[in-house]
Amino acid sequence: MSPFIRIGIADDHPMLREGVANTLRKRADFQVVEQGANAEDARDIAQKVRPDVMLMDVNMPGDVFAVVRFISTQLPNVKVLMLTVSESEDDAFLALEAGARGYVLKGVSGPELVMAIRSVAKGETYVTPELANKLLSNSKKHEAETHRFDLTHREEEVIREVSNGLTNREVASKLSISEKTVKHHMGCVMQKLHARNRVEAVTALRHYREREAIERLHIGTGKTQIDARGDS
């Protein structure tokens, strides 16, 4: 096992990117292995270099969330940590739903960024406390609207592929089942999600997953705050 936490950085602002890299290089257990300027760079770094943590900006050229999803599903040992100026709840939800393990705002102190990286490297979730509190607060407002959906493994597979834009025939081919079976599972999914069509089903499931992500953050944030007090 490497004694270092190997870090990749993708940000389209060169000065800021280099500033972050210089801050991290001062830590004896950190190693900045590669840098990039857009979403595709982040994907390439993750594939070729396999850093322990991939720092990514939300607002940079390319389909950032698609790359986050690719890394989280295809390269599970590479943990994604978003480092951004965006306080948008939608951006935070989309990043977490795509598989990011952390969401930190630029301007964060050096020690807190270090804490976030170490937490994410260990497989924990870390979100800037102020933003986490905001997300949790808004989540509670909609708690009454949140449903628990008990989908089977096959139903999960089908709706995941449908959410990726595949037709019933394409889903059937990918999962090696009949198109009739796909239609049956989609019917069950729509019934459980109280959806009238495929679009409503995908949207409802996405909102539910966002709520799950925020509930997990509540636990992760609590741990982070305890760790922070312990370091002071």
Image (cartoon, helix red, strand yellow):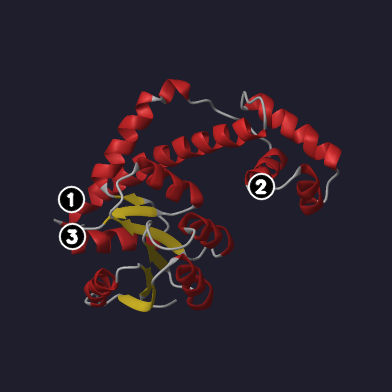
Residue 109: mark in rendering: 3
Rendered image: mark on residue 229: 1
Give the x, y percent position of residue 159. 66, 40
Find out whether the residues at labels 1 and 2 contact each other: C-beta distance under 8 Å: no
Residue shown at the point (79%, 39%) measured from the top left: 182
Local secondary structure at mark 3: loop
Q: Disc 2 designates what residue?
A: 165
Left or right: 213, with 26 as reference point: right
**Amino acid type shown at disc 1:** Arg
Q: Mark 2: which secondary structure?
A: loop
Q: Earlier in the sequence, mark 1 or mark 2?
A: 2
Q: Are marks 1 and 3 in contact (CB under 8 Å)?
A: no
Q: Nearer the viewer, mark 2 or mark 3?
A: 2
Q: Give the amino acid type for the residue marked by disc 3 in the picture.
A: Ser
The Cα–Cα distance between marks 1 and 3, rounded to whole angstroms, is 15 Å
Q: Dot 3: within a 10 Å radius of its alpha carbon, few (fewer than 14), some, or many (20 or more) residues?
A: few
Point 26% across, 75% down: residue: 18
Q: At numbered mark 1, what does the secondary structure look like: helix, strand or loop?
A: helix
Q: CA separation, marks 1 and 2?
A: 45 Å
Type of amino acid at the residue the image marks with label 2:
Gly
- Above or below, 31 against 90 in this view is below
Residue 216, position as x, y percentages in the image: 41, 41
User: Residue placed at 86% from the left, 43% from the top?
Assistant: 178
